[in-house]
C-alpha cells in the first residue's frame, strides 16, 4: 500500500513511540478514502521481529457488532427533533433547564453539562451487540470470516422470522439523573420473545471462540439499549474538562415517557468505529440481512 510505504519511509529522527504507532496503523488495510480509526489510539507494547506485541488494554475498541437503527428515516427525524428541542433550536419547544428566567439559555445548558457534542449523531443510531479490538489486518480478516460463517446460526436463532423492537421512554445507564453519564431508550422486543437475544448470543459465542473478545467483555450480560446521550463523546476544552456528567432531570421530565416507535431489525453489521460511510453510518466491513420478507440474503464488503 502507498500509505504503508510512506510510513515506512519516515524520517530517522522520528521517535521510537511514533514509529511503533505508525506501524500499527499501517498494519490494517483499508480503502484509500477511509481515515484510520486507530489514529488516536494509545498503543503499548514492544516490537519483536516483524510483529508488534501490544497490550489490548492500551488500545481502544476499533470495531463492533451493531444493529443499525438509523436506516429508519422516521426515527432519525425524531432524534433530530429531540436534540433540537433540548438545545433550544425550536422556538416553541425548548427544555426547561433552569428556574431562573434571567439566565441566557446557552449559559443554563452549559451549567447543566449539556452541549451538542454529547448527543448521539442520529445517522449513527444503533444497538451494540459486541465491542471488538481488531488492531491488525489478521484480526480484521478473522472477524469477517467468523461473521460470514454464522449467518445460518443467526437465522436459526431468529427462527427465520423478522424481529422488531419498541423504543419507549428514557433511562439512565450510569450515575443518577442529576449526574448522568449515559441516557438511553430502553429496548423491548415486540412479542416479548427472546429470539433477538439468542441471535446476539450466537454472535458473541462465535467471536469469543475465535479469540477476538476480551475476557471481561465475554463475561458481560448483554443489555440492548439505544444510547441518545453520552458524556464520553463530549468535545473537550479547558472550559469543559470539568464535566464528567450532565443533569438529565429536565430531559427526563420532558421525554421520560416518549414513544420513539416500533422498528424492524433489518441488518447486523461488523462496523468500524471512527470511520463513516456516505450515508453517515459507521463503515460496514460486512453485513447480514435479517429476515424481513420472503427472502434472505447476505452482502459483503471489502476491507
Image (spheres, helix red, strand yellow):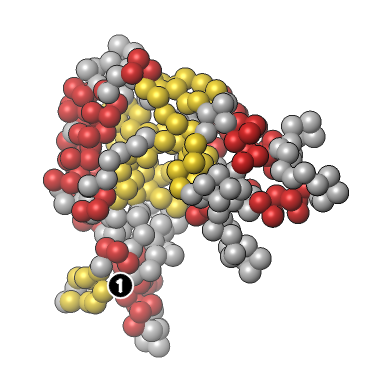
In this view, the residue farthest toward the top is 294
Residue name at image x 45 percent, y 52 percent: 274
Residue 172 or residue 30, whichever sits in front:
172
Query: Residue at 38% across / 69% down in the picture?
Result: 42
Q: Position of residue 251 (x, y in %)?
A: 62, 38
In this rendering, is residue 187 above or below 106?
Answer: above
Image coordinates for residue 293, horizontal then vertical, percent: 34, 13
The image quarter in which residue 294 lies: top left
- Tag 1 residue: 44
Q: Is residue 171 above or below residue 292?
A: below
Q: Is residue 227 above or below residue 16?
A: above
Q: Is residue 170 left or right of residue 100?
A: left
Find the residue positioned furthest to the bottom: 13
Task: Give the residue displayed 59% in from the left and 64% down from the top.
Answer: 242
- Using the image as rendered, state which of residue 253 and residue 16 is in the foreground: 253
Q: Is residue 46 visible?
A: yes
Amino acid at each position: 500500500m502507498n500509505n504503508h510505504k510512506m510510513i515506512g519511509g519516515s524520517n530517522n529522527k522520528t521517535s521510537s513511540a511514533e514509529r511503533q504507532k505508525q506501524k500499527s496503523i499501517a498494519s490494517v488495510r483499508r480503502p484509500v478514502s477511509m481515515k484510520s480509526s486507530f489514529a488516536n489510539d494509545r498503543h503499548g507494547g514492544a516490537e519483536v521481529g516483524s510483529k508488534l506485541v501490544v497490550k489490548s488494554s492500551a488500545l481502544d475498541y476499533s470495531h463492533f457488532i451493531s444493529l443499525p437503527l438509523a436506516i429508519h428515516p422516521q426515527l432519525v427525524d425524531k432524534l433530530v427533533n429531540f436534540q433540537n428541542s433540548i438545545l433550544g433550536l425550536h422556538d416553541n419547544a425548548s427544555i426547561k433547564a433552569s428556574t431562573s428566567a434571567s439566565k441566557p439559555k446557552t449559559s443554563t445548558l452549559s451549567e447543566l453539562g449539556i452541549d451538542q457534542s454529547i448527543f448521539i449523531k442520529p445517522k449513527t443510531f444503533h444497538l451494540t451487540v459486541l465491542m471488538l479490538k481488531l488492531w491488525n489486518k489478521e484480526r480484521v480478516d478473522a472477524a469477517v470470516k467468523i461473521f460470514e460463517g454464522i449467518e445460518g446460526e443467526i437465522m436459526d436463532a431468529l427462527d427465520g422470522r423478522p424481529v422488531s423492537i419498541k423504543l419507549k421512554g428514557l433511562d439512565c445507564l450510569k450515575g443518577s439523573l442529576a449526574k448522568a453519564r449515559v441516557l438511553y431508550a430502553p429496548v423491548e422486543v415486540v412479542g416479548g420473545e427472546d429470539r433477538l437475544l439468542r441471535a446476539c448470543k450466537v454472535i458473541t459465542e462465535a467471536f469469543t471462540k475465535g479469540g477476538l473478545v476480551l475476557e471481561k467483555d465475554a463475561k458481560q450480560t448483554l443489555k440492548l439499549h439505544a444510547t441518545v446521550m453520552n458524556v464520553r463523546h463530549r468535545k473537550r476544552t479547558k472550559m469543559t474538562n470539568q464535566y464528567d456528567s450532565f443533569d438529565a432531570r429536565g430531559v427526563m421530565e420532558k421525554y421520560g415517557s416518549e414513544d420513539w416507535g416500533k422498528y424492524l431489525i433489518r441488518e447486523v453489521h461488523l462496523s468500524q468505529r471512527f470511520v463513516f460511510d456516505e450515508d453517515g453510518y459507521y463503515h460496514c466491513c460486512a453485513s447480514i440481512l435479517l429476515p424481513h420478507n420472503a427472502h434472505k440474503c447476505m452482502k459483503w464488503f471489502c476491507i
